[in-house]
Image: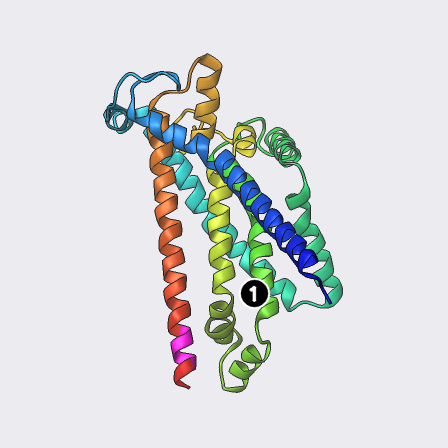
Amino acid sequence: MVTTAAARRIKRRAVAYKTFGQCAIWLVLLLMYLPILVLIAFSFTEATNIGTWTGFSWNLYSRLFQSQEILVALGNTLLIAVISATLSTILGTCGAIGAFYSKKRARSVIEKVTQIPVVNAEIVIALSLTVMFVFLQTYLFGGANVFSFWTLLVGHIILQVPFVYLSVKPKLQQMDPALYEAALDLGCTPNQALFKTTIPEIMPGIASGFLLSITLSLDDFIVTAFTRGAGLLSGEKNIETLSTLVQAKIKKGPIPPEMRALTTIIFLVVLVGAILVTVYRNVKAKQGKKRVGRY
């Protein structure tokens, strides 16, 4: 039987652990979000360097939409992200479904090969792609420059497909395999059964893989820097994305103050999107509980 003194010590220890854990969590959150909050605050002043306040102003936001250089980089970044994420989601989903219904040995090989780009250093992927494109340029295209939007797109797809595969795979494992077989027994063709049973069941994993692909593409620098060429909104010049633009500006001097306004807008858009998704999921969960309660 636990004595009163021992119970108090246990309670004090539990309170101490809880307090320490909460302090650690708040410290991590502070370290994560304090720089972002500082960046947001200084997006409302025209000072070139963060730390110098020259008065509240909306001018950086108006100048942002007048900067052709930043808008071109933003447009390139979004186009590459959407196109590569769409293709990567299709390829990764098809690969996950194909591997799931393959024999055990073939599935094991596919899974191991798919995981290599995930654990591999991004610089290795970028260098290997560059070597491959240079080889093709030298021996298949007669020395003509092959670096373009297409080489950049291939680099982003190779980077993203494994993450889509890993997002879809758990949903396939959670799915009831009898659904697909039941659809076939009820007269569906294999394609009809796939789109009426399998795809709806794994749609959360597909959506997660798509969003993850967009995120990987938006903040990628190494693969972009090694595989880009002329094209998209940059015309005959090398494709400039937000990451490569910032890197180029750092070489010459301070980052353009307008970038602070752009990053603030991006952060707010992502924040609003996350809130809307959370609200939507909570509403769907409550509706599901109400249906279960009715039955």
Q: Quadrant of the N terminus?
A: bottom right
Nearer to the camera, 4 or 228: 4
Q: Say above or below: 145 vs 49.
A: below
Q: Residue at x 50, y 48 (%)?
A: 212
231 within the magenta span? no
Name the residue rendered at 54%, 46% in the picture: 22
The quarter in which the C terminus is drawn is bottom left
The residue segment tinted magenta is: 288-292
According to the image, what is the colour scheme of the structure?
A: rainbow
**Front residue of this view, candidates 247 and 237:** 247
Q: Residue 244 location in percent, x, y?
A: 47, 26
Residue at the front extreme of this rendering = 4
Name the amino acid type tagged 1. Answer: Lys
Tell whether 196 sits left or right of 264: right
Q: Residue 230, image x and y in percent? A: 44, 29
Q: How many marks?
A: 1
Which of the 4 image quarters holds residue 260? top left
Q: Secondary structure at mark 1?
A: helix
Q: Which residue is mark 1?
A: 171
